[in-house]
Amino acid sequence: MCRWLAYSGSSIPLDELLYKPERSLIDQSLHARLGVETTNGDGFVVGWYGAGANTPVLFRSIVPIWNDHNLREISARVQSPLFLAHVRASTGTAVQQTNCHPFRYGRWLWVHNGLVREFPRLKRALALAVDESLYACIEGSTDSELLFYLALTLGLEDDPPRAVERMVGLVEDTGYRHGAEYPIQMTIATTNGESVWAFRYSSEGRSRSLYYSRDVRTLRELYPERPLLHEVSDETRIIVSEPLVDLAEAWNEVPESSYSHIREGGHELHAFHPR
Amino acid sequence: MCRWLAYSGSSIPLDELLYKPERSLIDQSLHARLGVETTNGDGFVVGWYGAGANTPVLFRSIVPIWNDHNLREISARVQSPLFLAHVRASTGTAVQQTNCHPFRYGRWLWVHNGLVREFPRLKRALALAVDESLYACIEGSTDSELLFYLALTLGLEDDPPRAVERMVGLVEDTGYRHGAEYPIQMTIATTNGESVWAFRYSSEGRSRSLYYSRDVRTLRELYPERPLLHEVSDETRIIVSEPLVDLAEAWNEVPESSYSHIREGGHELHAFHPR
Amino acid sequence: MCRWLAYSGSSIPLDELLYKPERSLIDQSLHARLGVETTNGDGFVVGWYGAGANTPVLFRSIVPIWNDHNLREISARVQSPLFLAHVRASTGTAVQQTNCHPFRYGRWLWVHNGLVREFPRLKRALALAVDESLYACIEGSTDSELLFYLALTLGLEDDPPRAVERMVGLVEDTGYRHGAEYPIQMTIATTNGESVWAFRYSSEGRSRSLYYSRDVRTLRELYPERPLLHEVSDETRIIVSEPLVDLAEAWNEVPESSYSHIREGGHELHAFHPR
Amino acid sequence: MCRWLAYSGSSIPLDELLYKPERSLIDQSLHARLGVETTNGDGFVVGWYGAGANTPVLFRSIVPIWNDHNLREISARVQSPLFLAHVRASTGTAVQQTNCHPFRYGRWLWVHNGLVREFPRLKRALALAVDESLYACIEGSTDSELLFYLALTLGLEDDPPRAVERMVGLVEDTGYRHGAEYPIQMTIATTNGESVWAFRYSSEGRSRSLYYSRDVRTLRELYPERPLLHEVSDETRIIVSEPLVDLAEAWNEVPESSYSHIREGGHELHAFHPR
């Protein structure tokens, strides 16, 4: 199990979300409350987009995030309008940077919380379904990275929701053929630096937790004493696998079998149907 | 806060205590129950004595113990009649091998759970009290290592209980002079490869937890189905900061302000008086 | 490029070869003389067989070998009659434990110095040739590990020389089809804990260096002052990518396109023909 | 031995100096030419000042610099008008972040190449000479860090050249009293974010190499084809322990027993006299 967050909106220093909130991601890495594992100390990645840069920057480490001084130094100085962060609890695959999320391909980032069941038995069939030109880009050994390359194979860059639906359909088909009762359990976020798509789905219909922040105008009324809420734009949103702050009213749950699309001009929820 | 264990008795593979028990040290590093911190992921050391070797071997790492594959490989093959293991939760000093316990000096090992309060203000005065010939041996920056070198300065190699009592007396005096209300909180184990001394003390009289295993003959009657208990000698003992197994009747608490002395021929409890 | 050694013979402490010789492997990791790269600081593995154990032990690290204190502590205490050690200089793939050699499968170990040319373009075709039951065992991203699983697929456990010849044949065929002029460059050692096979081959006929130690009886006459030579059995052999000691007369070169077979009762050189 | 560089002038991306030049610092870490050791793989630090920030940022790692992907990602995006970088070759003290330079105190950075001879015997006497309020700030175990805190004790923040001269005088006195023939060997750079002072001195009068770049106007005439030289201000300077580029005419040696002072408005060389 893992914990992740996605931020999109006004440019803010990374540490505003990574370190400063109660129940921050750093705190969750030591003591997650909603997850299967309480400790997420098997590496982390922060990926962010700069002003005008096409390719996001990745800061990856297998040190537990609470011990990484370089991230602490840098996150106070780096401003970004869109970033993803993920703290990992390995479910068996090696603890190495190439197994830490977000993964990157060109302008795209991808994080996953969950698993493909019976993955050792499915792995070869899934890897063969990756486009030939992408196969050698796979650097690690996780199910999560393979899901990313399958989604890229199935059109992620053109139509992310359809590509993820087709990817899940492929994984479920492959899983059922290999005898997995519930092949996939996932929350996923992916972004091209402009929009963020966040998915919540599992074959068994009991998916890992996922939340999105309510409208900033509402939050300002609820919490007038929080200066950051007054500095960011109305369209700023956060998506998290576990609420970052102990503000009970700031968060809505992403419903089962649905996805959230965050982009300039608004936030939408849609149903998710594997294809 | 940290978790540690000391084993003395028949030679056994290290993994019998490190990995196999319920509530093993590895499990405690992920989710300690009795400690101040629940995660002890800031490095670890296992120190063991071989057959006939004078100097113990140290295996040190800043990787969380649950992720260290080398320890897993080796601990199944290494047999030892006396070993100490410690998983660290830093209270602020750097996460580096030289800050991980047990520390070693010649034949001696030393582990500590607890802290010296107001340590930054006391550090110089305490360091000056270390014998000149030992000062350059200090490799790290922790209070725990400094306590070891103070005890060595005050006669650890000749009379361990008296040396630790004098060390605590010195720390308390120094602390009170610098305005610390309760200068020291500690459980400590030290060994020369033959005996183990384990101390429980704190200036405030509310010390961190410490347990020793009951007589093996009693344990065999209580748990006749555990083969390891029938293989080890009658004199085998374990001392732990937190019970290793969910066998409620296997453990006695080391009382406040006392120390346990484990050696060939028996186990003794004594009162502990700082001097 | 990398440096490796294989030892087979009387049981000796690991440090006798890893640390003590002039031009030891540790020294070669800092300043190799015969290789393409002078520094081999991108991780290392030592794999050894114990007395009677079927599965070899692996000690793996991405720390440069000259800085690994745990290996130094352990290698003085571990005795082994057969071990492989490898220091890595990455040619581009990630520096992570799963990319460090020797690789292990059951009782087998495998080390490689060299490369598969145009590997990113060949990788998928080669991976597809790995047996389905073995595919999910691949943990890393190197050409070297893939060569191992191809050899296992092609019968390594039954007839190692034929399996390696078939593996090289497959790689060359695949490479030529993808436009690689000289698909493979290699020295390889593999062992099941009883015999060691060491191969020297390259498609261009100019292979990386490889040496085997001369008969111990001859060495004793040449170097009567070396006590270790008098302690080990007559059949003890070392194979190295670069001579370990500055004893000019201790080493014979393994010829181009040939392999060395070291086993109880003798040492043989054979021609190597990709199939 | 180590390699370091200091840059002061127009704001440039860090990678312009760290990665792009022939004989860059990364290249020197693998194969230094002028140093005692050829490999500087025992950790590194890059410290830089931002626009307007008082406290410099530190990026520290014990990974060899050639393997640190995070530095590579970040150094292309970070612009700085003043930065120090150092690659370490340990002369015996532990490989840990707290032993890597530059060290930081408030606004000040400090790097050192060289050593204090007989350091284990001098260490306590030197540590006692550190101001009481600074003692607990010492995090590591190197001679280099202790030199920094001695210089701070002796007035570095008020008059850097005099403080370094007094520090060297103190080290030499202490060394001579303890029987060291040549107590100190050093090149040192220190900066408060505005000026850089770079010192070259050794008790034996044969100091480690140190170079400063010639006037940018001269360099533009010599190398009209280098665009970076036309982008930076006339006052831009680099100080290096080993020339970064194979441009024979770009560098002047800092003379024995002297120091270089780089600041807005000019560059000066002065004699250095221990006091």
Image: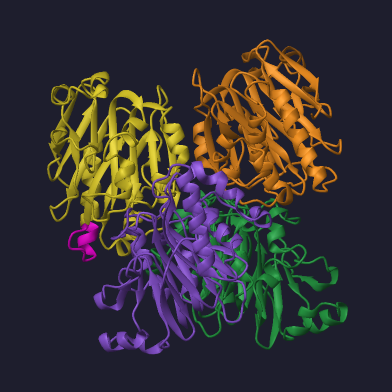
Chain colours: A green, B orange, C yellow, D purple
Whether residue A105 appears in this view of the structure is no
Give the x, y percent position of residue B95.
60, 50
Placement of B50 over or under D256, stated as above or below: above
Image-based side of C9 in relation to D257, left or right: left
Q: Quadrant of residue D199?
A: bottom left
Residue at the (65%, 69%) spot, across then down: A199
In the image as oriented, which residue stretches furthest toward the top? B265
Between C268 and C124, which is closer to the camera in this rendering? C268
Front-most of residues C273 and D22: D22
Is C174 magenta? The answer is yes
Residue D174: image x %, image y %? 50, 48
B180 to the left or right of D205: right
Residue C55: in sight, yes or no? yes
Q: Number of marks in the image? A: 0
Q: Which residues are magenta?
A: C173-183
Q: Residue at the location (35% across, 60% down)?
A: D208
Query: At which x and y percent is residue A210?
Result: 71, 66
Taking C208 as reference, is A131 left or right? right
Residue D227 versus residue A155 in the image, above or below: below
Front-most of residues D34 and A8: D34
Quadrant holding the C terminus of chain B: top right
Report the front residue among D112 and A273.
Answer: D112
| Image quadrant in which the N terminus of chain B is located | top right
| Residue C208 lies in the magenta-colored region | no
What is the quadrant of residue C19 in the picture?
top left
Give residue C111's position: percent from left, percent from top.
31, 43
